[in-house]
Amino acid sequence: MKSWTLRIATIVAVVLGGVIEATAQTGETTRVHRASDPATGAEVRVSQSPAGSIVMEIAAPGVTVTKRASNGTVTTVVRVAKDELTIEASRSAIIVSSGGRKVEATAARLERLGEAQALIARSPAARQAAELLGRISFGQFSPLTLAILSTRNMLLGTAEATAARGELGARIEGMATEPRLMRVSAQQERVQEDAQNSQGTGSSPTDCWNKYVKEALLAWAEYEDCMKNSGFFGDLACALLYDMRAIGAFTWWMKCVAIS
């Protein structure tokens, strides 16, 4: 298990670096993209700054989830009426804060990952956010759905996560086997293709989706392999790794279809 936890720490660092490197290439004015979920009343806002920071905020009555990737650090903050949970991951550490307590796990203190995971499991903010995120859905064929569910997976306790992983795995596998019902108008596709051609990408929205699905399947396979070999102490690291890959894939998809 020791070799796997060391490997996990290294992989998390590499993935975080890749997310920041990929987003830092953009120098455009910050644009905010919004989507509303009719079932929960939640609004999702996604933005990318000129400096390359990526922010995704999910706001519903009583619950706010904010994810930020900036300057080598990816931070998830969950706020409810009487609790706030922060999960901060960088190349050197994973820091979890809630209820006045803070746990920091590093390559030299990997055993503290178990304490960090327990702190998340005890957080009322984590429970309420996980419940909300489990009810939000923008459809089987929306990259935003997987970005949301990967965040939920990171917030769930061990018992709840087992069932949720099965549901999430079925959704991902379904992306590859079910028909691609891409609801993109001919006019929208032409506009996106023109933008992509001007940037030299040469990809249509359908091409972008197919590449995204491939990455989603690879990320899920890696996550499953990680969970089989990590043991309890590595579960949080595996979830963070998968969450980073899911957010990274979503960021890439936004750029591919020229909406970032």
Image (cartoon, helix red, strand yellow):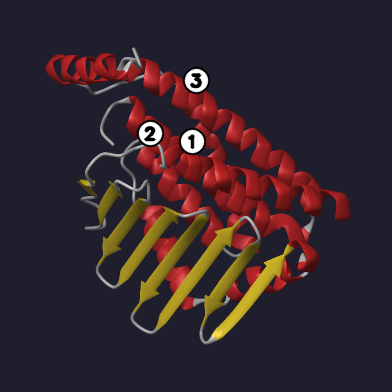
Q: How many marks?
A: 3
Where is residue 130 drawn, in percent x and y? 45, 62
Q: Do the residues labelled 2 and 1 touch (CB within 8 Å)?
A: yes
Q: Which residue is drawn at 59% across and 35% down?
A: 219
**Left or right of 121: which side holds 141?**
left
Q: Can residue 141 be seen in this view?
A: no
Q: Is mark 2 on a helix, strand or loop?
A: loop
Nearest to N terminus: mark 3 or mark 1: 1
Residue that numbered label 2 is attached to: 140
Q: Residue at x 73, y 71 (%)?
A: 112
Q: How far apart are marks 2 and 1 (CA)?
A: 7 Å
Residue that numbered label 1 is attached to: 171
Where is residue 105 drawn, in percent x and y? 69, 68
Foreground pick, 202 / 219: 202
Foreground pick, 126 / 91: 91
Nearest to N terminus: mark 2 or mark 3: 2
Q: Residue at x 47, y 69 (%)?
A: 127
Q: Residue pushed farthest bottom?
A: 100
Q: Which amino acid does label 1 sit on?
A: Arg
Q: Which amino acid does label 2 sit on?
A: Gln
Q: What element carries label 3?
A: helix
